[in-house]
Image (spheres, grey):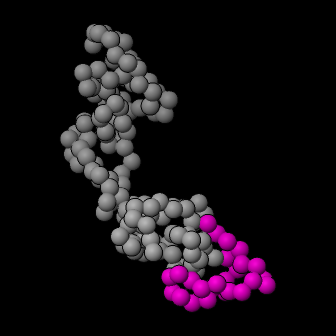
Amino acid sequence: RMVLDKEESVSVVSLQSREKPRGCAGCNGKIRDRFMLQALDRFWHEDCLKCACCDCRLGRVGSTLYTRANLILCRRDYLRLFGVTGNCAACSKLIPAFEMVMRARDNVYHLDCFACQLCRQRFCVGDKFFLKNNMILCQLDYEGGHFNGSTERQPQ
């Protein structure tokens, strides 16, 4: 029995030579391979632990799977089916739930839209940006006097 809305890690387990083969939760066959997967408190052939939507294999070391409504899903499909979507604060277009985003206070942005709204300079990791009157500004434009008043510096 699966738990509703559970995030679970997948681990690779080595089958010891004297160990009795275990049953696969996916195909119900015996696992005679050298390695098997362990997830959701059960064991699986590497090819049997798959996303119910896209059929991608979920057995990469350190990967995560999600369960909901008795479905086993990859992250992308879980978010596509059950994730919350929103609109980009810069372009107002829909942001799919599985897409990576940038956040500044209560605003959410597409990665491509997260840029200075005056000079369009994209930000790199570690760059300072400023949020003034709900506009994202680079340090040069903010300090260049285009905007007066106080603001909080927001680390990326």
Percent across and percent down for residue 64 are 51, 61
Percent across and percent down for residue 26 are 50, 82
The outermost residue toward the right is: 18
Residue placed most toward the observer, 4 or 48 = 4
Question: From this viewpoint, is residue 128 visible?
Answer: yes
Rendered view: 99 above or below 35: above
Q: Is residue 153 left or right of residue 14?
A: left
Percent across and percent down for residue 150 are 32, 11
Residue placed most toward the observer, 21 or 151 = 21
Residue 145: which quarter of the image? top left
Residue sitting at 63 percent across and 76 percent down?
36
Residue sitting at 29 percent across and 9 percent down?
149
Rendered view: 92 above or below 53: above
Q: Main secondary structure of the magenta part?
A: loop
Residue sitting at 39 percent across and 65 percent down?
4
The span shown in magenta is 11-35
Residue sitting at 28 percent across and 9 percent down?
148
